[in-house]
Image (spheres, rainbow, N blue to C red):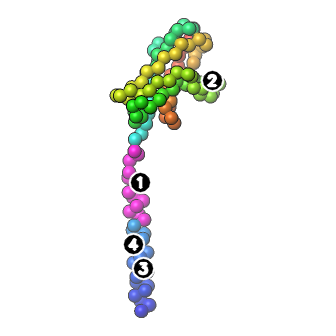
Amino acid sequence: MRTRVAAASGMSVALLCAGAGGAMAATATTPPAHPTSITVKAHPTTVKAGHTVRFAGRASGIRPGAPVTLQMDKNGTWMPLHVDSKVKKGDTYALATRVTMKGTQDFRVSSGKTHSSTVKVTVK
């Protein structure tokens, strides 16, 4: 009788281990749902104070209609500007703002927790 109980216990442990390993393997090979990214280009990149700069790009993995916001770096902190748009069908967006502060300014575009790379604009 003891032999059967020990054998059954050993099989249960083996099955549990195999099941856990299979579950871990399935989790490790599952690709991420939808990676998101935002690109941005500014035009023009050099402008006189008081003139308009246009920002445009693609928002990959972000649904059409989702909001995008222009942000500006102020002393190491990204400040949202009151310049918003929405992702259009085809994953594109466009924003524009008038720049007044002279010098080189860093801008980026964000949607939720996704941010574009930084683009520099020189204001003369």
Identify the mark nearer the N-term, 3 or 1: 3
Task: Look at the numbered disc 1 and give the secondary structure of its residue.
Answer: helix
Identify the mark nearer the N-term, 1 or 2: 1
Q: Residues within 10 Å of mark 3 (few under 14, many from 20)?
A: few
Q: Is residue 34 something that shows in the picture?
A: yes
Q: Which residue is mark 3?
A: 10
Circle number at residue 74 = 2
* Circle 3/circle 2 CB separation < 8 Å: no
Please determine whether, in this image, residue 83 is positioned above or below residue 10. Answer: above
The residue at the point 55 percent across, 22 percent down is 82
Q: Which residue is mark 1?
A: 28
- The stretch drawn in magenta includes residue 116: no
The amino acid marked with disc number 2 is Lys
The amino acid marked with disc number 1 is Ala
The amino acid marked with disc number 4 is Leu
Please determine whether, in this image, residue 64 is positioned above or below residue 4. Answer: above
* Circle 1/circle 2 CB separation < 8 Å: no
Q: CA distance from mark 3 to mark 2?
A: 64 Å
Identify the mark nearer the N-term, 4 or 3: 3
